[in-house]
Amino acid sequence: MESQSAAQSSHNSSETTNVAVSSWDDLTDGQQLCIDWARVQDWDRIKGYAKEHGPEVLLGVHSDKNSVASVLTEASHHQNVEVVKLTLEAGFDNKEAMNLAANISMRNSDNSTILRLLLEHGLDPNMDLRFEGVEKDFCNLLISAAYEGHIDQAITLLDHGANVNKIVVASNGDVASQLTFTMSYGAHDLFRLYLTRGAIPTTSDVFHAFNNCLGACKGLHPKLSRDVAIKMFTTFLHLGKPDSDVVQDQFNLHPPSRRDPTIANITKHYLQGRPFCCFVCEALTAKERDKLLMCPCRTVAYCSRECQLKHWKEHKVLCTGPLNERGESEAMVKKRSKTGKGAAAGGVNVGAADVGVAEGAGATGKNGKKGKKGKKGKKGKYYLDPESLRFRVGDKVQCRIGSDPATGWVNGTVMQLFYRENNWPPGQVAPYKIALEDGTDIYAPEDIPEVIRKPPS
Ligand SMILES: [Zn+2]
Ligand SMILES: [Zn+2]
């Protein structure tokens, strides 16, 4: 299988290169004065001077040893929102200084006002100064937010187009993702946020998840306690749904002496497609007893009635009710007796979001409806970036359409990436449209191995 990290390692190269800084002598006298006053926080003087001589006195930028000096960076450093605003409105557009201002303000405060102003005035949330030849180390704003544990700033960045799947290449050549960094900082709420906002685990993330969490369980991690590590690991599998072959391989790399019973148990359940945590709050045990409460369909579990009720509106369209001895739900039995066909598409195992029947040429009639069964809450998971998907047009794949985890797979060919039907809500896309060998067109609602996989060789 194509390495996921390789597929995602191409960085967003939309960055432009307005990072040139003037030498001190290139600045006007007014710009020099304003930078000097900013250094001593004489803000009133700067405001008065700009009023008198025009806003361009605020626009000076110059390189100061290893860093960049400007009114903007100084004002960000001292959380002076008014002067930051004044400077940006004067037309400040030096990208390096804006990026630095963002980093400084994020380091100094969890308030996201200055960050938002910078983004609204053209700060590129995906900029990495290392690629501009400016910084030696990586410099990624989502990772900075995770490092500080500032979730509002992370949300602000994502809302302004930060790419949660952007790979960061450190100065020593190491490639790492936002997920890996965020996990190793112990920032569980940001880790969860990034997964809900579309972070797709790579092979390297799975490797680091085992490494970080198993290390933490042995008390060997500088930032992760065992409790937080287990929470991270649970969230990672529950929301990230990493490729199960990769999970199995990485798990096998660790000798029994290094394994942790809780991590091993979660992994085992995940690989068997069984629920291992409360679907809503990711608790590992029920509130009243040490086992989770299982929905009769056995695809989801909860810690409490409250969590079940919270999820019911979403789950009821997927819930197949109690299963018979053949592993079929009542609805599936009905359907089978009606059509005389074998068990129809139905999510029996956890994570086995149904493969819906596609509309259009070659579809099998009765279309559209089943598509609704695709899991909700996944909208926006797929940036319309083919690099984020595991397969390409023309790839031979297997799709899960039957209830049996072993025999419910059929062969097909990927026909289209990012498929959508007209009656879907805005923004909803399925990662693949697939032509099956029998001529049926279907779509896969999610790019997960429980739904679509490479044919066994
Ligand atoms: Zn719960
Ligand atoms: Zn159910």
Image (cartoon, grey):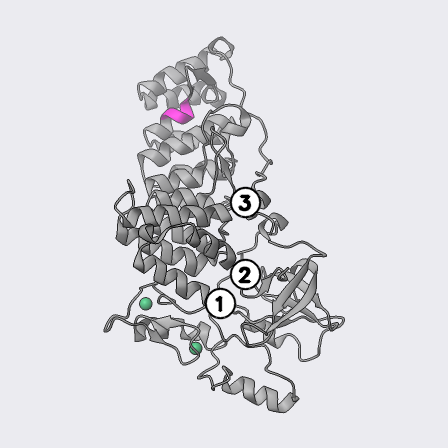
Residue 72 shown in magenta: yes
- At x 45%, y 67%, the residue is 272
Q: Residue furthest bottom?
A: 337
Of the four image quadrants, the one with ligand 2 is: bottom left
- According to the picture, the residue beneath numbered tag 2 turns out to be 448
Q: Distance from label 3 to label 2 (Cα)?
A: 16 Å
Badge 2 marks a residue whose secondary structure is loop
Q: Residue furthest top?
A: 25
Q: Position of residue 101 (x, y in %)?
A: 41, 30
Q: Compare marks 2 and 1 and give the one earlier in the sequence.
A: 1
Residue 5, numbered circle: 3
Identify which amino acid the numbered label 1 is placed on: Gly
Q: Compare marks 3 and 1 and give the one earlier in the sequence.
A: 3
The region drawn magenta spans 70-74
- According to the picture, the residue beneath numbered tag 1 turns out to be 351
10 Å crowding of disc 3: few (<14), some (14-19), many (20+): some
Badge 1 marks a residue whose secondary structure is loop
In this view, the residue in front, 60 or 68, is 68
